[in-house]
């Protein structure tokens, strides 16, 4: 299936949606109200609690927390999320499910490099990425 906006392939699977549902349930157990966005939305969730709200991006990583010093996301996506969050008076939350748990970080600090995925043999997967230190992530599930 292709992304209707940019004519790029979509790699999202049913298993990805199942992992997202699990992360949503973890957030809800922490007392948050969580709304899911559609497949081609700029982020996965809008989350709010009594005194906070977040635009949230979810990723599943197939390694344990701490195996790498940073977690990456496309820098262009992060800039867009930070801009949208500022307009809404919200923050950006990065929710990552590692093999050993679900972790979340409010994104306040990051650095950029060129990087991305190489396992799909898609040259569009190499681009500017934002690195968020794992030390910012807290285990939530």
Image (cartoon, grey):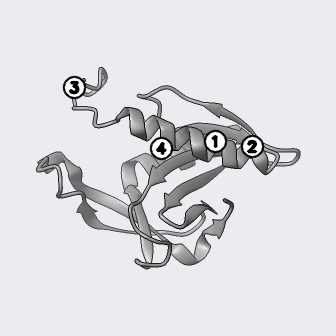
Task: Tell me residue 35's x, y (percent).
Answer: 66, 31
The local crowd at label 2, few if under 14, some if 14 to 19, many if 20 or more residues have their Cα within 10 Å, is some
User: Is the C-beta separation of discs 1 and 2 under 8 Å?
Assistant: yes
Image check: 62 left or right of 33? left
Say which of 9 and 18 sits in front. 18
Task: Identify the disc placed on residue 133.
Answer: none
Q: CA distance from mark 3 to mark 2?
A: 34 Å
The residue labelled by disc 1 is 24
Q: CA distance from mark 1 to mark 4?
A: 22 Å
Quadrant containing the C terminus is bottom right
The residue labelled by disc 4 is 80
Say which of 4 and 111 sits in front. 4
Q: Please report the residue visible at 43 percent of the width from the left and 66 percent of the height from the top.
A: 71
Q: Is residue 118 above or below residue 71?
A: above
Residue 90 visible within the image: no
- Tell which circle, 3 or 4, labels the residue nearer the N-terminal end: 3
The residue labelled by disc 2 is 28
- What kind of element bears circle 3? loop
Q: Please report the residue visible at 82 percent of the width from the left and 46 percent of the height from the top.
A: 31
The local crowd at label 3, few if under 14, some if 14 to 19, many if 20 or more residues have their Cα within 10 Å, is few
- Tell which circle, 3 or 2, labels the residue nearer the N-terminal end: 3
Task: Tell me residue 87's x, y (percent).
Answer: 65, 39
């Amino acid at each position: 299936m292709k992304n209707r906006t940019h004519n790029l392939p979509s790699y999202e699977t049913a298993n990805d949606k199942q992992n997202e549902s699990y992360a949503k349930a973890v957030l809800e157990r922490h007392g948050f109200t969580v709304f899911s966005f559609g497949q081609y939305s700029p982020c996965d969730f809008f989350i709010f609690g009594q005194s906070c709200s977040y635009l949230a991006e979810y990723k599943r990583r197939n390694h344990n927390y701490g195996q790498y010093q940073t977690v990456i996301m496309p820098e262009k996506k992060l800039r867009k999320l930070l801009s949208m969050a500022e307009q809404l008076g919200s923050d950006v939350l990065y929710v990552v499910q590692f093999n050993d748990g679900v972790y979340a970080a409010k994104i306040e600090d990051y650095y950029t490099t060129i990087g991305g995925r190489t396992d799909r043999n898609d040259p569009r997967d190499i681009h500017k990425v934002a690195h968020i230190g794992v030390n910012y992530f807290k285990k939530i599930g």
